[in-house]
Image (spheres, grey):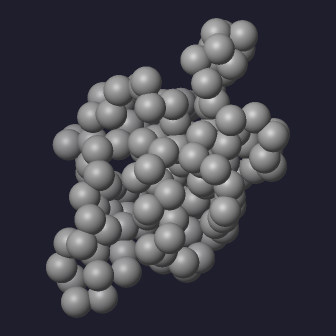
Amino acid sequence: MRIRVDVASQTLSLFGDDGACVRRYSVSTAKNGVGEEKGSHRTPRGRHVIRARIGAGAPLGAAFRGRRPTGEVWSAELDEASPGRDWILTRILWLSGLEPGRNRLGQVDSMQRYIYIHGTPDSEPMGVPLSIGCVRMRNRDVAELFDLVTAGTPVEIHE
C-alpha cells in the first residue's frame, strides 16, 4: 500500500501493492499552501512514511490533544464552547519525512512539526485548503484509511 496526497486537487489516494487505486478521498490541506519550514503552517511536500498510528478503537469524533484522547467526542456544542480550536479527531496518522533537508531534520522536519493525516469536524469543508499544515479528512474516511494502512506505509505529498 502507498498513499498519494495531491494538493492541487485536494485528494488523497490509496494504492494497493499492484499499483491500482483502491480508495480516493477528498481532503483539506494547509490554507497557507505548501512549504516545509517550521512555523509556516503549510503542508510539507515530498516523500514521507506513516511513523505512528494513533486512536485505534476510538469512537468517530473522538478528540485528541498532544496525540492523547481528551475523553471528548466532537459536537456542535463543544465546538461552540471552544472557538478557534483546531480539532484533531477520530484517528491520527503521524507522518515522518524521508528527505533530509527537504522534510526531515532541522527546520523542515515533518515529524517535529506534528504533521498528521487526521479527522476533522464533518461540518468543515473538504476539497478546500483550510488546515494549519496537516491533511484533514472526514471522520469516517480517516477511520477507514487507518484500518487499511500500517506504520511504515509510504506517503507522497505533491502539488
Asked whether, in this view, residue 150 is left or right of residue 4, the answer is right
- Of all residues, the one furthest to the bottom in this rendering is 18
* Residue 93 against residue 151 in the figure, above or below: above
Q: Quadrant of residue 96?
A: bottom right
Horizontal placement of 64 versus 103: left or right? right
Q: Residue at x 44, y 32 (%)?
A: 122
The percent coordinates of residue 138 (x first, y second) are: 42, 42
Task: From the viewer's side, name the closer residue of 97 and 151.
Answer: 151
Task: Give the residue drawn at x 20%, y 43%.
Answer: 9
Image position of 121 with respect to 148: above or below: above
Question: Looking at the image, which residue is at 60% across and 40% down?
Answer: 61
Position of the N terminus, as image quadrant, is bottom left
Q: Tell me, yes or no, if residue 53 can be seen here.
A: yes
- Of 154 and 76, which appears nearest the observer? 76
3 sits to left or right of 67: left
Q: Position of residue 118 (x, y in %)?
A: 54, 48
Please provide percent x and percent y for residue 50.
56, 69
Q: Is residue 36 visible?
A: no
In the image, residue 35 above or below residue 152:
above
Residue 6 lies, with reference to residue 125, above or below; the image says below
